[in-house]
Each structure stands twice: as C-alpha cells, then as structure tokens.
Amino acid sequence: MSVICTERLTRRFGNVVAVRDLDLEISGGGVVGLVGPNGSGKSTLIRLLLGLIKPTSGTATVFGAPISHPRAYAARVGALVEGPAFVPTLSARTNLRSLARLRGIPNGRVEEVLEAVGLLDRSKEPAKRFSLGMKQRLGIAAALLPDPELLVLDEPTNGLDPAGIVEIRTLLRRLGDEGRTVVVSSHLLSEIEAACDALAVIRYGDLLFSGPMSELVSRAGGCIEAQPEHIADVTRLAELLASRGWTVSVREGDVLVDAPASQAADVNRAAAEAGMTLCALRPRNASLEDVFLRMTGEPQEAPA
C-alpha cells in the first residue's frame, strides 16, 4: 500500500489554481523530495495531505485513509510546516516536554528525539539562543515526538547557511535510512538532492515528474553553455535558439542549450548570424540541476 496517493487532486484559491489534477503516488521508506519554484503549489499540497485545508476536487489518501478524515492517520504522521514556533525563554527540553505532555507522550521520548537531531548537549539552553539551523532541528525533533512513520517537512532548509543545509540534509538521510518515509519540500533541488531517493517535481500546480532520482539523472545528457558578450543579448539569444528548435533555459547570464557538444558550432553560427558575439561557449555534461531548471524554469522567476 502506498503511503500517499492522490487522484486528480485540485485546490483553487479564487481564480488561482494552486494544485491542478495531481496524480501522485509515494511508496514507503526513504526521502522523497517535493521540489519546484516558489509558488508552485508544494505547501498547498502538504496542507491538503495533512487535512489543514480541503480540496476543491479530486481525492487523496494517506496510509489508505482519505484526507477528509485526517484523524485516521494523524498519529502516524509528524509534520513541520513553515518555521517552528517555541517559547523563546524556555529550554529546548522544556519546550519539547510541554508538547509531549499535550500529546500524552512520555518524557523519555523527548530525550530520544533530542539525541536524534543532535541537540542533546544543548537541550538546557533557551530556544532564543539557537541559530536558525538549530531551531529547524528543534522543529524536526518536535515533529518526531510521536515516532511517526511519515515525516513531512515544508522547506526545512529555507534561510539556512551552507553549514546548516548540510546538517539538515544529513539528518534527513539518517531518518530515511531508519525506514521512515520523509517528504521534504524545497524550491531548490541543490539543497536536498544529496538526501533524496525519489523526487516529485511540481510547477504552478502541475506535476512534471515523479519517480526515482536515478530516472531524472538519466535525462541529463549533454548541455552547451553559451555566454553572450553583452548581457543585454541573453534574452535575445535564448529566444533565437528556441526558435531554431533547441530547448533552452537561462541561468546567471548563461544560455543553457539542451544539445550535445557536436552542436556547439551550430549554436555559435546562429548567434553570429543574428549579430551576437559569444565570449564563452562551453559544451559539458548536464547536471541534475540543469534538468530541474529545464523542467521548471528559473526558480527566481516564479511568482511569490
């Protein structure tokens, strides 16, 4: 039985379709990345699955129970949605013990989750002294209190520095290796790529890809980086190459062309015929993030 299954799941907010006819199946075990640009519907999907909002149409189940009755599976799910909130003057341990008491969970479990997220040695410190990364780990500890089979984390690396991102990735990988199903959303594939076994890629409410990480890697193929001499020519070059039949995307002043190295001369010739000079032309193997950007477009161009 799948842990999560959706059928034509749709959620509208007025004229905006946040999730559109989504058919998604997530099996048990491992880390599943829910990725897409900001505003693509990831948080809406998570709220639907947790029973926090109702769908406009379609159906979905979690552990076989319909999302219209979240009480049927709530005890098997832990979640961190948006930033974790704690009483700043209380210690990490006291904050977690208060949450555990509300859910009838013994204090011994608090010690276990503090150790699991690497905060046992800092558990007596007030939460207000914690860095953003430590607060995120404390939020994950709170989500782990009921010892859930499914852990859902909405943008857990958002705002973290590189060291904090690595800490969270390592923690996610360890939790997935324990046999839990961890669903983690992010608008940047590079932040969670190393932790994921599978991916679901969403863009503006539509599912673009769902499957093992290895399947997405196989799509990488060749790529040509073309950099115009004048930054003002970037958009014009991208439009020109797209009109010639190439699949292109733009990133950091470079036009990325989905093509093998053997076509680099053709790209150069097309630019020259249009009166554009290239200051760099670099054939290379495409990365997983290149594939992601081709599917979703530039993350920073997505609406808020």
Image (cartoon, grey):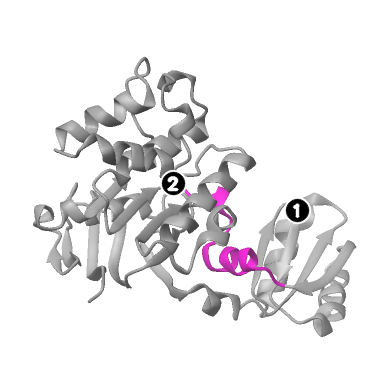
Give the left or right position of residue 154, taking residue 54 as reference: right
Give above or below for 147 relative to 102.
below
Magenta span has 22?
A: no
> Mark 2 = which residue?
155
Q: Amino acid at mark 2?
A: Glu
Give the left or right position of residue 207, taking residue 157 as reference: left
Residue 17 visible in this rendered orientation of the protein: no
Residue most extreme to the top: 89
Mark 2 or 1: the one toward you = 2
Q: Residue at x 13, y 54 (%)?
A: 70
Give above or below for 71 relative to 66.
above
The magenta stretch is 286-304
> Mark 1 = which residue?
253
Image quarter (top left, top right, bottom left or bottom right) of the N terminus? bottom left
Q: Report x, y in % for residue 237.
A: 75, 64
Q: Secondary structure at mark 2?
A: loop
Q: Secondary structure at mark 1?
A: loop
- Depth check: give the residue in front, 120 or 30: 120
